[in-house]
Image (cartoon, rainbow, N blue to C red):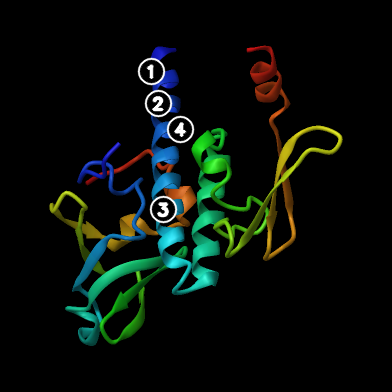
Amino acid sequence: MRGRFSRKRYLRDLAVQRARRLVELSWKMHSEDEELARRYNLLAMALLKRVRAKVPRDLKRKFCRKCGTPLIPGRTARVRLVQRRFPHVVITCLYCGKVYRIPYLREKKARKSA
Amino acid sequence: MKITPKNILQHELIGLGVEVKKSTNIYQVGIKGIVINETMKMLIIKTSKGRKRIPKEGRTFLFILPSGEKVLVDGNALLGRPEDRLKRTTRKW
């Protein structure tokens, strides 16, 4: 059923667009009202989950998926480069303490061989 | 995808300009501001005189879209949690 399929895609696209708007607003709102900023991001997550859409790559580092706080380096998040075990970026949410690790081993290897 | 009068019922209301056009409570008519939060039955509007909580039910709202267009929306059509509104299908508007 082509019609159904395209409707699914349409809803996914719509949800992603809404989530983008919310995350953007959340960053602006954070200085004014932290609680509301968190609410926006959690709402964005709820939207994406509802249509089973992935969190877009550019949004992945922009907010904490556990508590919804916008991850602003230096203000609400700590960003560190760690070499031990495997090279990775560690992003810590300073509100709830959730830790995100993003490896960059592949990038490093590519650089070495080049 | 942009917010258009066609998809506003499924789209994000937070961040849009809004004005209360019709209400059973005459003191609510004419309240203007920006939507800053949305719950199942209420819109929370930031005005120059603080935050106002307006029920969606039975009111008519005038939304100002980012493109500058203005749309009249029946509040009853907006009832429901914001994430539930996304999937609603039957619309007679």
Res. A24 mark = 3
* Residue under numbered circle 2: A7
Q: Amino acid at mark 2?
A: Arg
Q: Say left or right for A36 vs B34.
A: right
Percent across and percent down for residue B15 are 33, 60
* Residue under numbered circle 1: A3
Q: Amino acid at mark 4?
A: Arg
Q: Nearer the viewer, residue B6 or B60?
A: B6
Q: Is residue B62 above or below residue A56?
A: below
Circle 3 sits in a helix, a strand or a loop, which is it? helix
> Share a chain, discs 1 and 2?
yes
- Chain letter behind tag 2: A
* Disc nearest the viewer among 1 and 3: 3
Give the residue at x 40% y 62%: A28
> Share a chain, discs 3 and 2?
yes
* Residue under numbered circle 4: A12
